[in-house]
Image: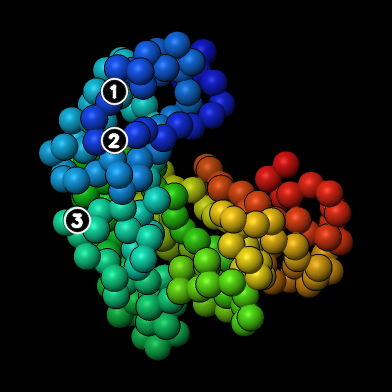
Amino acid sequence: MKNRRSFIIGLKSKILLPKEKNFLKKYKPWGVILFSRNISSISQTKKLTNNIRKIFKDKKYPILVDQEGGRVNRFYKFFNTSNFTSEFFGKLYKKDIKKFNTYYKIFIDQTSYFLEKMGININTVPVLDVRHKQANNIIGDRAYDSNPKIISKIGDYCIKIFHKNKIATVIKHIPGHGRAKVDSHKYTPLVINSLKQLLNSDFYTFKNKKSLFAMTAHIIYQNIDKKFKATH
């Protein structure tokens, strides 16, 4: 970790370009995040991650991916997760907790297997946002449920299994994206609820999590700070 700078970069394609290699050597970012454009197969991705790590001479150099399942699936070319949304597992948790424990563990183990084979050591899960009616669908079925206590318990289980598989996790989108009425990739959401409401609901799910990392919500919470997004 010595002399690395506190930012993460993405790459343009499925191979490490000479300009990117020079950039990594010069600026030493903390980590690299991969997207679908970088991934076509297990062997190709493993070659890419090996080439990244050779630059830093570090077998544990942080390489991340957003591999939630459902519609957020960077491995879609070889791993179909369309039915395995967070909502699916949330419903299963409420219906049959024993079956949930078995099914979700199998899903996480399978995901971890692909991550390990491709040389990826950080997955940006779990999504701990609370699902709210009339909110933008950017979260939608990526949320486990609308009950903060259920979300918190499933989140703990998710983190525990990934960590057992030696995959680091990133809780998101702290302190809570579920009330956003617009897609924060395109516009800045404004949440007007009181701090008390947020603490009892949206913010609750992120408390006491054993994940070392978190991804922030690019949202303005008007009753906390009228000017700056939570990220800032």
> Earlier along the polypeptide chain: callout 2 or callout 3?
2
Mark 2, residue position: 13
Mark 3, residue position: 77
Q: Are marks 1 and 2 in contact (CB under 8 Å)?
A: yes
Mark in the foreground, 2 or 3: 2
Q: Which residue is at the front of the view, 143 or 23? A: 23
Judge the density around disc 3: few (<14), some (14-19), many (≥20) Cα neighbours within 10 Å.
Answer: few
Q: CA distance from mark 2 to mark 3?
A: 15 Å
Q: CA distance from mark 1 to mark 3?
A: 22 Å
> Earlier along the polypeptide chain: callout 1 or callout 3?
1
Quarter of the view holding residue 105: bottom left
Q: Residue at x 78, y 59 (%)?
A: 221
Q: Is residue 206 visible?
A: no
Judge the density around disc 1: few (<14), some (14-19), many (≥20) Cα neighbours within 10 Å.
Answer: few
Mark 1, residue position: 17
Disc 1, SS: loop
Disc 2, SS: loop
